[in-house]
Structures are given as structure tokens and as C-alpha cells.
Amino acid sequence: MGDLHVSAGAKSTDELRRLRTVPADWSLGFAVEGPGAWLWSTAAAVAALGDPPGFRHPPGEPGLEDFVEWCAKALRAPDPLVLRVAAYGMGESAPVLLRGLNAPETVRNRVEAVRAALGLATVPDGWADDLAVLLALVPADDARVRTAAERVAGGVLALLRERAPGVDPQPELARYLADGTLERHLGLA
């Protein structure tokens, strides 16, 4: 059994092709290549999707603006619930920002996505421990969550400024990243 996911569904070939063009929302920004099998198919579906069909999704697009928004919410959180929800959002949005600084990786399921994110090589100091806290994978008190949020926010922005200033296609964000405006906005500088 293990982590094998089994679900039966019926979708048109067009819908399956469309789904292959959309990043998987659970993949933390990694490309997805999952196994598949036909329970029933037509010759046209097999010709269009292959045999076995598999489930492919492209990697997610980096969203610096979303990351900064989650950081602001976490760093200014008025209570523990807001802090933890925002920290989780940071944890989900940070790996895709760092993906371009690391070797490409493809995942098959959410567990592999989390392992891939924790195992990224080019990351801020304390990344694996801090990301595990942000994603609520380990017990942590509110002070530890705040510390992890501060370190990930500052570390990710510093790495991006140094190594990938064009990570987001919005030109004003590249300028704000380069001149330290994002850190000042978050109260980190």
C-alpha cells in the first residue's frame, strides 16, 4: 500500500491535456510526474495521452509578491492563529522562489515535494529547520515560529537579491528587491 494514491475518475481528453498545463497546487512549485493507468480508454485517448497516461504538471511560477505578503502577515501577526496561518503560507511560497537556484527536481506526491523543499541545497542558513516549523511539521511555540518566519523572510530575500534578482517578472518588484525596499517593508532592515 504505502503512499500509492488510487482514484477513479472520468475526464475528457481535452480536460486531461489542460490539467497537464497547470502546476499542481500541492507541489510547492516543483514539476510533477506521477504514474497513471487506464481503467477504460478509447484509442483516441491513448493516442493523445499515451499508455500509460501518467500525470504531469509543470513547475509553479515564483510569486515574490505573494511571499512578501505572507511574510508581512506573519511578522505583524496580532495573535497565534494569524501567525501560524501566515507562516504556513510563507512555507508554501518560499520553495518555488528558491527553485531556480537549485538543481531541477520532479516530484510524484506531496511528501516528495516537502522532502525536496527541505533538501534544497542553495538556501538561507537554518532553512530545513525553519521550513519544517513554518509548514507545521514539527512542534514549535509561537516564539520559534516568529523566529523561523524572520529568518526565512530575510534569508530568502537576501539570496534572491544576490543570485536571482529577476525571479519575479514584475519589474517594480525586482527594483524593490535590489534596493532593500522589501526588507524595509517587512521591518527586517
Image (cartoon, rainbow, N blue to C red):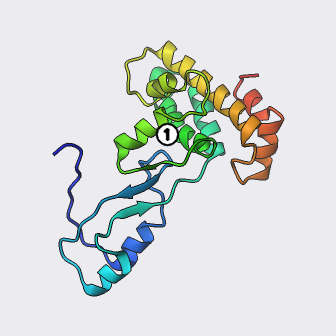
Q: Residue at 76%, 35% (x, y): give it.
A: 162
Q: In this picture, is 59 found above or below 99?
A: below
Give x and y (percent) for residue 152: 59, 27
Is residue 148 visible in this depiction of the protein? yes
**Element type where label 1 sits in the image:** helix
Give x and y (percent) for residue 42: 24, 84
Q: Which residue is at the front of the view, 158 or 77?
A: 158
90 sits to left or right of 100:
left
Q: In this picture, is 189 found above or below 57?
A: above
Residue reaching furthest left? 1
Q: Which residue is at the front of the view, 163 or 14?
A: 163
Residue reaching furthest front? 103
Q: Which residue is mark 1?
A: 92
The amino acid marked with disc number 1 is Glu
Q: Residue at 74%, 48% (x, y): give it.
A: 166
Rendering quarter of residue 185: top right
Q: In this picture, is 40 found above or below 105?
A: below
Q: Residue at 53%, 35% (x, y): give it.
A: 120
Give x and y (percent) for residue 73: 58, 31
Crowd band around label 1 with a 10 angstrom C-alpha radius: few (<14), some (14–19), many (20+): many
Q: Which residue is at the front of the view, 78 or 140?
A: 140
186 sits to left or right of 46:
right
189 sits to left or right of 85:
right
Give x and y (percent) for residue 164: 72, 43
